[in-house]
Image (cartoon, grey):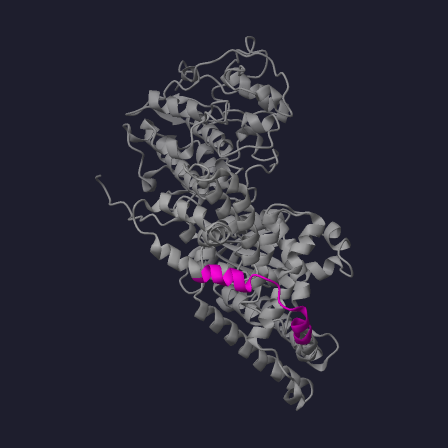
């Protein structure tokens, strides 16, 4: 056996696969453990043999970036080895993800909880950006949560570095609801601001307990965004009408975030609004966000170990529809997801012309 | 701060967190030792292979030395810019592929894997890791006498040999940074600027034929190359960074680096390498050459092992059936260490 093969076999022997926990077209995920210590891990097995061009781009990106990034708020790649024609990534085991947390209707979020998750997302993202890496697929189910409550950026299959200014990048990145307007208009040159927009959408979703800008198609995403935040003027966002895929999505009036996010503090809304600025140059950076007064104002972020999380794995029910509401019971304003169909509101869609973006919060009929 | 104490995070420079810094940094002595140990181990293995192929046959074989191996690698390093030129790949691809080839031969011997094959694979892999992928067919079809299989067969081995460390920090990027810095300095002769940059870039390209990247940081290489092209600009930049303090230490450190780039930054004499290549044909590892006894033996051994594993698994299943649980009771840790859950 060659030295390289031998080294690979050594790596392989360190880990044991226990149980298949998920399967996609190109990858299977196992729960496993480190043989020597019993430490729980996740093993992502990528079937390389299926690709006619060899190792595929998303596997290469994931390995390339996670090999370099070591941070409390970024998923840790513990090892890589190959078996036959498969590539195996050994990742730290993370219990749940932010999407499952948001959708679990039994959980009540306090403002301090939302602050803690948002802070951890920004810390992980700031580290990526400091290392010249764009994530390009931030959304709640790519923010994984460890047993002790730490939030970690995961899934770097669409990531790339941006240390080569001047080269065109694809605009077909980021899941639609979290995609910034410059990408919707087909920008081929963009920067860290794309990830910030996604974090802004996630931040809003934590408060609403429902996706903030759920567009139904790429075109509808533009309208949904404009309906929520108003159609940008040339002054708001110089040059946006010259972007390759620009189209006139209609005129929507400017709105106040306050109208939708009634329970949020002033600092909170200020940070949110700065994540969702149309002009990417004016959007806040991850580093600036970490120094934003929101994070130093009361209440302090909840300690990770005290954050709400789903009680039992697999107990979260699939839900057809999510409504946001504020629950004023208890000591402080907490946001709770409603049980299905409990609060079906008539939507005042006439003034907006079509489907609203996120529902206004309604306090009239809480139980 | 109240509550629990924050973890002590002493910020390290970004570069020091990179895999390049952590896994691919050597002193010149370590580098020489790594290569000579690798060469000695390879010769021992191949000698055995020769013996098992045909007893007594290894005595007349003249194996390559570590230096000779390196010479051959260097010749093929020189082919990478040519190959990249055909496809008009950006410099990033070319530089990355050259780093991969050099790293590959810190883990492998040319007597197992000929650089003319490995070179094709590292370039293809580099297009992907630097985000300029092209379809394999398009790649292989433009290279004479090369099938897609030739390129892909070694891809896994190459990725493994690199330890899956795909990110390379390049000196040409550091030079770009230096150049941007220099333009902000006052009292420098502007008309020499772009000539100095071009000259420095030429030296950077030469440095890729050397071991500089294993010993020095990209910024050190960039500064040395700038200093070769324009000592005045390099020291003006150094002064701007070190203030009034002395920059003698840095200048002194640059001298051996400059000497390395100037003396080793060129392709080896083709005649000398041709001689090495001729001898390589005779001392190649027979286990890697289809048709030889040693190759057949190795393949047979692999098949025997796979068969053994199959039987073991069948036996476990049979036992489980007897125990009344067709899905197998809790298998022992031993059993599931294997990767036999594969759906091939």
How far across and how far down the image is residue B166, in percent? Answer: 54, 54
| Visible residue check, residue B204 | yes
| Visible residue check, residue A71 | no
Looking at this view, is A335 or A229 the one in front?
A229
The chief SS type of the magenta part is helix
Looking at this view, is A236 or B70 the one in front?
B70
Question: Residue at image x 63%, y 23%?
Answer: A219
The quarter of the image holding the C terminus of chain A is: top left
Q: Residue placed farthest to the top in the image? A: A351
Question: Residue at image x 53%, y 37%?
Answer: A136
How far across and how far down the image is residue A159, in percent? Answer: 54, 42
Question: Above or below — where is B184 with respect to B86?
Answer: above
Q: Which residues are magenta?
A: B256-276
The quarter of the image holding the N terminus of chain A is: bottom right
Question: Above or below — where is A118 with respect to B86?
Answer: above
Question: Above or below — where is B4 with respect to A354?
Answer: below
Q: Residue placed farthest to the bottom in the image? A: B56
Looking at this view, is B329 or B1 the one in front?
B1
> Which quadrant of the figure has residue B287?
bottom right
> Which quadrant of the figure has residue B1?
top left
* B129 with respect to B26 (left or right): right
Question: Above or below — where is B247 with respect to A306?
Answer: below
How far across and how far down the image is residue B218, in percent? Answer: 47, 53
Question: Residue at image x 48%, y 28%?
Answer: A201
B267 inside magenta stretch? yes
How far across and how far down the image is residue B133, in percent? Answer: 65, 47
A335 inside magenta stretch? no
């Amino acid at each position: 056996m060659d030295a390289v093969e031998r080294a690979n076999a050594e790596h392989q022997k360190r880990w044991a696969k226990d149980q298949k926990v998920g399967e996609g077209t190109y990858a299977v995920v196992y729960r496993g453990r480190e043989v020597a210590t019993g430490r729980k891990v996740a093993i992502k097995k990528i079937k390389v043999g299926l690709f006619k061009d060899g190792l595929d781009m998303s596997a290469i990106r994931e390995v390339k970036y996670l090999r370099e990034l070591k941070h409390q708020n970024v998923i840790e790649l513990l090892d890589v080895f190959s078996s036959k024609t498969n590539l195996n990534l050994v990742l730290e085991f993370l219990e749940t993800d932010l999407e499952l947390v948001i959708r679990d209707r039994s959980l009540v979020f306090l403002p301090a909880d939302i602050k803690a998750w948002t802070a951890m997302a920004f810390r992980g993202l700031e580290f990526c950006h400091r290392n010249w890496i764009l994530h390009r697929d931030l959304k709640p189910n790519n923010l994984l949560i460890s047993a002790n409550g730490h939030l970690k950026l995961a899934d770097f299959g669409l990531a790339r570095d941006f240390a080569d200014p001047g080269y065109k990048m694809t605009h077909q990145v980021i899941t639609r609801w979290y995609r910034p307007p410059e990408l919707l208009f087909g920008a081929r040159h963009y920067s860290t601001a794309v990830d910030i927009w996604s974090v802004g959408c996630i931040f809003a979703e934590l408060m609403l307990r429902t996706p903030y800008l759920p567009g139904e198609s790429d075109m509808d995403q533009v309208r949904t965004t404009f309906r929520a935040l108003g159609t940008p003027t040339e002054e708001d966002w110089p040059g946006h009408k010259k972007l390759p895929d620009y189209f006139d999505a209609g005129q929507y009036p400017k709105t106040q975030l306050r109208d939708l996010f009634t329970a949020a503090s002033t600092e909170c809304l200020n940070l949110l609004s700065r994540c969702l600025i149309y002009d990417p140059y004016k959007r806040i950076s991850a580093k600036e966000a970490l120094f934003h007064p929101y994070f130093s104002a009361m209440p302090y972020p909840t300690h990770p170990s005290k954050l709400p999380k789903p009680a039992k794995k697999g107990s979260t029910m699939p839900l057809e529809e999510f409504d946001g509401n504020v629950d004023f019971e208890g000591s402080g304003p907490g946001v709770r997801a409603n049980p299905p169909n409990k609060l079906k509101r008539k939507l005042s869609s006439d003034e907006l012309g079509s489907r609203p973006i996120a529902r206004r919060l309604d306090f009239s009929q809480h139980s | 701060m109240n509550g629990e104490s924050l973890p002590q995070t002493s910020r390290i420079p970004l570069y020091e967190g990179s895999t390049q810094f952590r896994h691919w940094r050597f002193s010149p002595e370590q580098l020489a030792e790594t290569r000579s140990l690798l060469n000695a181990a390879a010769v021992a293995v191949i000698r055995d292979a020769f013996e098992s192929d045909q007893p007594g046959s290894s005595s007349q074989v003249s194996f390559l030395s570590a230096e000779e191996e390196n010479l051959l690698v260097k010749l093929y390093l020189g082919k990478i810019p040519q190959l990249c030129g055909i496809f008009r790949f950006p410099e990033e691809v070319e530089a990355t592929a050259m780093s991969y080839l050099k790293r590959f031969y810190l883990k492998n011997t040319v007597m197992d894997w000929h650089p003319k094959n490995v070179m094709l694979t590292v370039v293809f892999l580099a297009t992907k890791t630097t985000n300029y992928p092209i379809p394999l067919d398009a790649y292989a079809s433009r290279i004479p006498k090369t099938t897609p299989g030739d390129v892909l067969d070694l891809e896994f081995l190459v990725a493994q040999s690199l330890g899956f460390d795909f990110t390379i920090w390049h000196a040409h990027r550091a030079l770009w940074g230096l150049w941007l810095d220099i333009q902000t300095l006052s009292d420098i002769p502007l008309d020499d600027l772009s000539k100095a940059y071009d000259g420095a870039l030429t030296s950077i390209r030469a440095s890729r034929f050397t071991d500089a990247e294993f010993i020095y940081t990209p910024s050190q290489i960039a500064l040395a190359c700038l200093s070769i092209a324009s000592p005045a600009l390099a020291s003006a930049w150094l002064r701007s960074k070190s203030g009034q303090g002395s920059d003698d230490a840095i200048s002194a450190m640059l001298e051996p680096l400059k000497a390395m780039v100037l003396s080793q930054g060129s392709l080896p004499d083709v005649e000398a390498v041709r001689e090495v290549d001729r001898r390589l044909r005779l001392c190649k590892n027979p286990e890697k050459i289809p048709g030889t006894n040693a190759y057949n033996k190795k393949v047979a051994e692999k098949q025997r092992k796979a068969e053994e594993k199959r039987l073991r698994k069948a036996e476990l299943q049979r036992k489980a059936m007897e125990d009344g649980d067709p899905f197998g009771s809790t298998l022992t840790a031993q059993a599931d260490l294997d990767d036999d859950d594969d759906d091939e």
